[in-house]
Every structure is written in C-alpha cells, then in structure tokens.
Image (cartoon, rainbow, N blue to C red):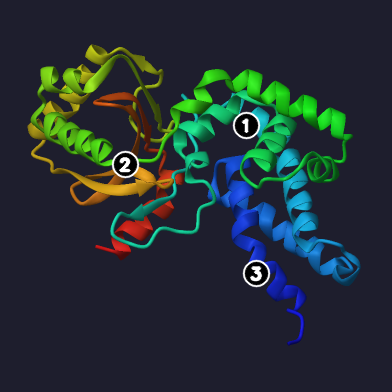
Amino acid sequence: MSPPSETQTFLDLRPRLFGIAYRMLGTTQDAEDAVQEAYLRWREADARSLRSPQAWLVSVTTRLCIDRLRSLKVEREAYVGPWLPEPIVAEVTSPEAELEKAQHLSIAFLLMLERLSPEERAAFLLYEVLDFDYAEIADALQRSEGACRQLLYRARQRLGEARGRFSPSSAQHRALLEQFVAATTAGDIDRVVALLSEDAQLVADGGGKARVVLKPLHGAHRIARLFHAVARQVAAHGARLDHRLVRVNGELGLLRLFNGVPHSVLAFETAGDRILSIGIVANPGKMSGVADRALAGA
C-alpha cells in the first residue's frame, strides 16, 4: 500500500487541528483561518523529512493561535459587554462529531480558559486534550521542558478547582432544561428560582448588536426576573418564542427562536438538580452559522 499523499495526511489531521485551534481561539472563523494558514505552510514544508507530521502540524497551528490570541487581546478589551466563545451547535438526534474529550469543549470550559495567557492555554490544551508529553509540548512551543512544566503548573493554579466542575450531560441535565423551558415560557419566577442555585450566574454576549444584559447577573432571583420580563415582552408583542433542545459544544443546551428565526444559544452548567450558570450567545456574527444550519434542518 502506497503512503498517503501530503494533502491526504493534512485532511486526516484537520479535525484535530481545528479542535485545538477552536479551543484556543473560541470562534470557528479564527480557527479556520489558523488551520488554513497551517495548510499553506505544510505545502511549503518537506513533509518526507518530518519525523511526525501530526506533531509538526499541531506545533505550527498552536503557534499561529498564540500569535492570533495576542492580536485579539485589544479587540476583546474593546468588545461591548461580556465575550463568550462562538457555540458549535448540532441536533441532539444527529451523530455527534468526533470530539476529543468533550468535557474540554463546553462553553463554560472555554470561557474558563480566558483566565490563561496564550502560552499557558496552549500548554494546558496540548497536555490535557491531545495527551502530548512535555518533550512534545516543548517542541510545539519552542521552549524548554522545564519552562513548559511551569506553564502547565501556572495554568492549573489559575484554573483551580473549577476544572472539576465540567461533566457530560445526563438525563438529569436534560430534565432540568425541559423544566427551565416550561418555567421561563410561563414567566413563572418562583419555578425558575427553584431550578437555579442561589448564587447562579448569567452571562450574555450580544456584541453590541443584540439586545441583551450588558453585565453578568448574579443570583437566582435576578436571573428569574430577567426571564419573566422576556416572557412578558414576548406576550405583549404577540410574538412566538420557541426553544429547541440541541447540543452546544457537545453538551445539551437550547437554541432559542423568535418567530421561527434563530436568535440565541443558551449553554448551561448544572450540578445535581440545580443550574449553576447560563451563557447566552446572541451576537449575530456568532449566530450566523448556527442560523444557517438550523434553517437548513427545519
């Protein structure tokens, strides 16, 4: 059997490259751009002389992402309201994409990574998601093994105990979401409060282009009152608000539609019988791809 072509080798590794780029950058377009640039560099490289095409491509993609994160720092500092990662949405009934360690893909996890420097984020993801050893991480980041150990140590310190909070969705998670939809649609403040932890948090990303709360909301009662107000506005304008159960970055979440048009995606972090946090992505720029896929499947 003849060895695969250089293009085929890249295509085989592309899902993994996109996975690391998306986790690093938080938007599909930035991730696609990084992977495309890695491909252009791959075409110029002497692939036959490389000991490990995967290690080479992951290293190049990672360094491209680190450079992009540095340039994004100014953009995100000027962002209107909270910034959340762009959601990857799929129908619950469709086969799930090949996602390496889905617990490392949730919106809550990606938002948590924002605490890290670009290099810390890269070291953490290479070690935790791709199972790279310290020598491979050192090669990817062009640093010593000792320096990479320090990067990983600092990343773990910054993330602290929050790392243990991200678990796959369960039947209980689904039940909570179904109850949440029923309670918010009815505008029942007490029922919504009962589903939320006392110190629950809501963060909404409208990017200055969609009408959402511009600051995080803390506390079950404040969050419940927000959804009550939305229910009242929908009823007052004779509008229709629908919720579709979807997979948001591998975990169960909601796609919210106003008058049949995709408006926002809701991601949830839950524990037991309570909702700990809600992330709402309504920025039209981040919703465009979601809307296209949702309408295509309607």
Residues at circles 3 and 1 in contact by the CB criterion of under 8 Å: no
| SS category of the residue bearing label 3 | helix
Coordinates of residue 210 in the picture (x, y in percent): 36, 34
Residue lying at 69% horizontally and 75% vertically, measured from the top left: 8
Cα separation between marks 2 and 3: 30 Å
Q: Amino acid at mark 2?
A: Gly
Residue 5 visible at all: yes
* Viewer-side label of 1, 2: 2
Q: Which mark is residue 139?
A: none
> Which residue is tagged 2?
253
> Which residue is tagged 3?
11
Residue 41's image quarter? bottom right
- Tell me which numbered mark, 3 or 1, is placed earlier along the sequence: 3
> Which residue is tagged 1?
75
User: Alpha-carbon neighbours of circle 2 within 10 Å: few (<14), some, or many (≥20)?
Assistant: many
The N terminus lies in which quarter of the figure?
A: bottom right
